[in-house]
Image (spheres, helix red, strand yellow):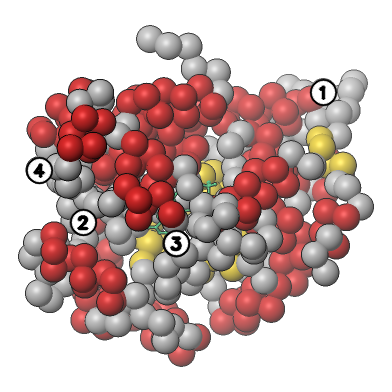
Amino acid sequence: MPVITSIDDLKRLYKRRVPKMFYDYCESGSYTEQTFRDNTSDFSRLRLRQRVAVDMTGRSTQSTMIGQSVTMPVALAPVGMTGMQCADGEIKAARAAEAFGVPFTLSTMSICSIEDIAAHTTAPFWFQLYVMKDEGFVDAAIERARVAGCSALVLTLDLQILGQRHKDLKNGLSAPPRLTLPNILNIATKPKWAVDMLQTKRRSFGNIVGHAKGVGDLSSLMSWTNEQFDPQLDWTKIARIRDKWGGKLILKGILDAEDARRAADFGADAIIVSNHGGRQLDGAVSAISMLPQIVRAVGDRTEVHMDSGIRSGQDVLKALALGAKGTFIGRSFIYGLGAMGQEGVSRALEVIRKELDISMALCGVQKATDLNRQHLLVPDDFEGAWA
Ligand SMILES: Cc1cc2nc3c(=O)[nH]c(=O)nc-3n(C[C@H](O)[C@H](O)[C@H](O)COP(=O)(O)O)c2cc1C
């Protein structure tokens, strides 16, 4: 068993064990990848304030996200095709999250279905919805999430049109992968992935095939998804979905103070400050650098969560200190999943929890809920750089 001490260790193993097509799908940003890079490099511009001679016993990373108790304020973000990173990947990640005591968010574009996750877990999970033109599909998905006992709907607002990732086009990304010669040669070097994948029946989009009208196989699915993301999504349509759902609603993909104010006025239970992990608008600012402005804009009218670029517990600490009530990790848990399945997701969460805990201690903080701006050293131009 390899010794895992960081998210980077998991990433190295992940790269070795998962077909290149799916590694590239995860480890890319759109176009020049500038925003993808800024997401992580801006975290490293912030510094933690070391304090001494403060009693560091009795520490706790416990908190709440939208009123739900969490062992640390770090949820698993919705990640499409997680079940291609590892057979039955969404089920494995959801089980790891449940055992750890953090929320799992299932993507609309998952391989395992809403019903699959409900059947293999006991804790309520969150469902992420992409708004499609087919209202019948959207309404049925909301109803399926309700029946499955989902405790929040996460509505993603920053992907009504796809930012291009060059590698996905070059690799001919698909689920399951097409058996071209380069793919066969590459998969032959990932025997565990291949054997596990042959043993599961879940190899296509479980929330869509058989649920969307006229989508029964892969080719009809491709044309359906290309046509279906609704480019007319606006606040009226969001209100229709809110009313249809009637439960806790989280709006994901907010990166602007104006939009954040609008979301707070609208009555969202939480917003996620996010640029989709640098996968959509290349050239947009990093999520962490927008966080302080957005926190100021909404005050306590809605809960502010953030994602995009978190690779460590120190990063989580920085986001909480800048005013986030909760955070999400995307790639950090996918590395673990691709590296070691369910155990790898548990390891990723454990790495982050330990880093958060030790860093809190060295900053003289006992409770994650006490973190604030005082615990950071922020460069003068951190927020104002892009005014
Ligand atoms: C491979 C991949 C697939 C993703 N698929 C979705 C998705 O289906 N729905 C969604 O709302 N966000 C999706 N995201 C964005 C994540 O939810 C999250 O915003 C992002 O991963 C955060 O950045 P991080 O990976 O740096 O943590 C995806 C991200 C990745 C890396």
Disc 2 residue type (three-letter) = Phe
Disc 4 residue type (three-letter) = Lys
Which residue is at a point 23% across and 37% down the rendered structure image?
Answer: 182
Horizontal side of 90 relative to 204 (left or right) equals right
Foreground label between 4 and 1: 4
Q: Is residue 237 visible?
A: yes
Q: Quadrant of residue 218?
A: bottom left
Question: What is the spatial separation of the Cα atoms under label 2 and label 4, in whole angstroms?
Answer: 11 Å
Question: What is the spatial separation of the Cα atoms under label 3 and label 4, in whole angstroms?
Answer: 30 Å
Question: What is the spatial separation of the Cα atoms under label 3 and label 1, in whole angstroms?
Answer: 50 Å
Q: Residues within 10 Å of mark 2 (few under 14, many from 20)?
A: many
Mark sitting on residue 55: 1
Residue ID for mark 3: 164
Q: Which badge, 1 or 2, comes first in the chain's sequence?
A: 1
Residue ID for mark 2: 205
Mark sitting on residue 201: 4
Horizontal side of 48 relative to 174 (left or right) equals right
Q: Is residue 93 visible?
A: no
Question: What is the spatial separation of the Cα atoms under label 1 and label 2, in whole angstroms?
Answer: 51 Å
